[in-house]
Amino acid sequence: MVMKYAAPTIFAYLKALQALIVCGVWGCCPPATKVGLYSYPFLRSTGFEISERHQGLDNSVPTNHLLANHASASHLPANLSSMNLSSMNHLSMNHASANHASASHLPANHLSVSHIPAHRVPVNPEDEVVPVQYSLRIPQPSARYAEIEMLIDTRTKDTVELGLPVWAPGSYMIREFTRNVDRFQATDAESGRQLSWWKCRKNAWQVSTGGVERIQVRYRVYANEFSVRTSYIDQDQAALLGSSVFMWVEGQQSRPHILCISLPQAWKQAATALVPVATETKQPTFRAAHYDELVDCPIQMGNFPEFTFEAEGIPHRVVMPGAGKFPRNKLEQDMKAIVESCTEIFDHQPNLNYLFIIQHAAKGGGGLEHANSTTLQTREDVYNQPERYTDFLGLVAHEYFHLWNVKRLRPEALNPFDYNREVYTHHLWFAEGITSYYDNLILRRAGLLSTDKYQKTLLDGFNAVLGNRGDLEQSLAESSYDAWIKFYLRNENSGNTTVSYYRKGAMLGFVCDAALWHRSGGEFGLDSVMKWMYGRFALQEQRGFTDNEIRDAFRMHLGSEADSLWDRYVYGREAVDFARYANYAGLILKDTQDYMRKAYFGAAGNRNPDGWVVTSLWEGSTAWKMGIQTGDVLMKCAGKEPESDWIRDLKPGDVLKVEGKRDGKKIEFKGILESAPFPRFMWLRDPAVNPLQKKVYERLFQEAF
């Protein structure tokens, strides 16, 4: 691959940067012996001092504890010690097209194997730490390839191993990113001589260095999966997830990492939460304290609208690729309210700045959390539809809340990350489910969701949990542990055998919150447990919590009822007694039984030209008992074509005749329609409500009873 750089400028800056590395001054750079995401984000990520409020829950935490093993900030070169990194961290990189030559003399998809001197930091044999350097270019966006070049110090190694993650933290599924990698090669960085290499695992390569001081590794990555968990490139944009693009160097993960991006000619912006270190160059250059930080910062490139707002004393940059018209002032106001409501819970803002990447498209959705940024996906028309807009704000709240819960307060299995294989925990219900409870609660506290609508979301949650057949088969702990093979790899029978740790975990969040407010006499709720755990495990001890420690934390605040919740609802499979906990707030949870009066078939499907294709069945339902299978094509149900409302005029007890095809052969079924087995709840106010119940209600719903 041929890369053209503003060589004198980059070379001079990186030479100065090398001096910083030798001094050990990298803002949030961890000691070389400490690896993992916990090693950098607990105080503001590039700051040397924080206010007393930002020290978290225990004022004994030293303001400079991340600098304990580093040179003083006063040792920075004069031109850097006064640099306002907080304002630089999310600067838009604007570049003239003339400065982004893309080696047009090469074929568009050609990765050159000829030797071209890479931009590099001069190596001093006495230096102990040399950064891992990356160059990224997209020579032809329509071809969907990102080309990567790495410069690696190999002075003490006969062989060097490189690896690419098989999964993306925050999304618990093996995605095999290596399947998109090709044209791997390695050369002597000085002479360009080809070096031998071989695959040693499905996601790892070994290179024989031949005793050279530095090697150059090149490869390319095909990116055509538009989601927050993968990477995507087209003629208009590149949305890159670091874990799917950047290889690590075994044994050098804790070193500083430098990334230089060469933007395509027509693109002017690169947005990432990585710290910029060469903003005056034609290609933006960034640094990460270590590999975990490099791959935890997604990169958005292209031309897109953006804005910045300040909340809790820090700038929040919002980039909007794919967006047309949007209500900037309203969006800014609502997002600011969400940030403030989230931060109030923990009384600690862990970053100097934050980046929202909001991608707009006709398809796609969801979000993925990162330590100081998030990627969200939504539709462009969401801003004109009140209900969808509220759902989008819930997504914003969910991912922002992850700043604390998951990215810093996390199960021990997720610290540090093992990118080679699955990591198992029983507590995704806490990591994701409790966060899902808070996303709507935060909107309610921020005044973005009415009490009526908030209470309806809770009722919908109760209905979904108790109406889920899989709730009888799988506990929350099992659901968390088996996420890798069940939650993310669903099939037509999943609804009968699994429970969502998002949905049920969120509803257990309500249960815990109500129980805590009740036990404390209205003095504290779930916020206090979250704040205490964050203060102890994230800020003070900087480690993950164990299975016993999370139970102990709830036991400390809730007493013996915590054991009951754990035994019955976390590790057990009992139906959650939502009515009991609703009554702590003076509410009666009544099942309307509306659906019990309606006929229920028990099969879901999709319409195609031949008929209605069955895609899933509810175990024990009428369709199940009749012998219908997934894949059957239903053509007549009770003499009608099975449109969406074909069962509307039928009632429980009616005889149902079904005609269809299976593998091209005619089939017929007959059975007795049964009623729906799902509860449908409504709230009623307890006429005998007492003062404590009123107080709990006010704490839970942010209004007077």
Image (cartoon, grey):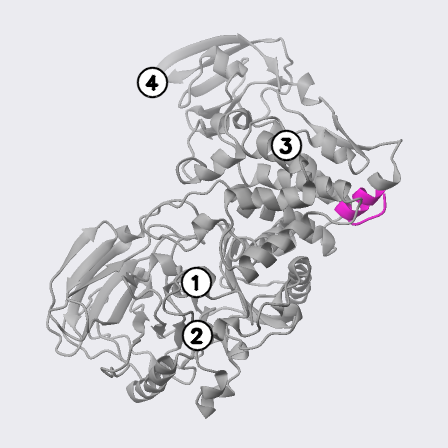
* C-alpha distance separating marks 2 and 4: 72 Å
Provide the residue designation for mark 4: 664
Q: Secondary structure at mark 3?
A: helix
Instruction: Tell me the quadrant of the picture where the N terminus can be found.
Output: bottom left
| Residue at position x 77%, y 40% in the image | 518
Give the residue at mark 1.
298
Mark 1 vs mark 4: in front: 1
Residue in front for this viewpoint, 116 or 346: 346
Is 221 positioned to the left or the right of 313 in the image? Answer: left
Q: Earlier in the sequence, mark 1 or mark 3?
A: 1
Q: CA distance from mark 1 to mark 3?
A: 41 Å
Name the mark on residue 564: 3
Q: Which residue is mark 2?
A: 69
- Please report whichever mark, 4 or 3, sits nearer to the chain's N-terminal start: 3
Check contact, mark 1 vs mark 3: CB within 8 A.
Answer: no
Percent x, y for residue 82? 52, 88
Tell me: 424 left or right of 581. left
Residue 71 in percent (x, y) is at 44, 81
Secondary structure, mark 1, is: loop
Between 557 and 586, the one nearer to me in the picture: 557
Nearer the observer, 376 or 68:
68
Q: Looking at the picture, which amino acid does disc 4 mark?
A: Gly
Q: Is residue 404 above or below residue 636?
A: below
The mark that comes first in sequence, 2 or 3, is: 2
354 inside magenta stretch: no
**Which residue type does callout 1 highlight?**
Pro
The amino acid pointed to by label 2 is: Asn
Secondary structure of residue under mark 2: loop
Q: Quadrant of residue 109?
A: bottom left
Give, as a single range, the part of the protein colored magenta: 694-705
Q: Are marks 2 and 4 in contact (CB under 8 Å)?
A: no
